[in-house]
Amino acid sequence: KLVGRLRDDIGLTIIVIEHDMRLVKGVSDRVVALDYGKKIAEGTYSEVASDQHVIEAYLGTRQENAS
């Protein structure tokens, strides 16, 4: 809540490095997803969470999961 208030009330830009996606969704206007330090997606939470590159990087592919 505090991060959101600082962002909204004061207009601060805040960089959060986090793996808890519920937290990220709650406090972020923009999200950047990295895979081994390389940016693979950027946008709103919904855009990044549904991006095929992000899904493959974090959940794997069907073929990888089948083995």
Image (cartoon, rainbow, N blue to C red):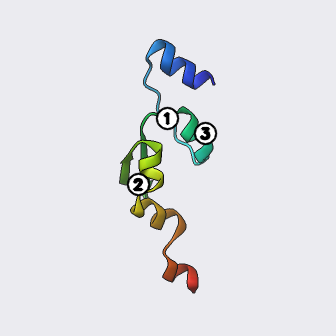
Disc number for residue 28: 1
Q: Quadrant of the C terminus?
A: bottom right
Q: Residue at x 49, y 83 (%)?
A: 63
Question: Which marked residue is nearer to the observer: mark 3 or mark 2?
Answer: 3
Instruction: Determine whether the residue tagged by mark 1 lies in a helix, strand or loop.
Output: loop
Q: In x, y percent, where is residue 15?
A: 47, 33
Q: Is residue 38 above or below residue 61?
A: above
From the viewer's side, name the closer residue of 19 and 62: 62
Mark pair 3, 2: CA separation: 21 Å
Q: Quadrant of the N terminus?
A: top right
Label 3 is placed on what type of residue?
A: Leu
Mark 1 or mark 2, earlier in chain: 1
Disc number for residue 37: 2
Residue 26 as seen in the image, left or right of residue 37: right
From the viewer's side, name the closer residue of 60 and 34: 60
Question: Which marked residue is nearer to the observer: mark 1 or mark 2?
Answer: 1
For disc 1, the neighbor class at 10 Å (few under 14, some 14 to 19, many from 20) is some
Q: Residue at x 48, y 75 (%)?
A: 61
Label 1 is placed on what type of residue?
A: Ser
Disc number for residue 23: 3
Q: In x, y percent, where is residue 64?
A: 51, 80
For disc 2, the neighbor class at 10 Å (few under 14, some 14 to 19, many from 20) is few
Instruction: Determine whether the residue tagged by mark 3 lies in a helix, strand or loop.
Output: helix
Q: How many marks?
A: 3
Mark pair 1, 2: CA separation: 20 Å
From the viewer's side, name the closer residue of 58 and 26: 26
Label 2 is placed on what type of residue?
A: Gly
Instruction: Determine whether the residue tagged by mark 2 lies in a helix, strand or loop.
Output: loop
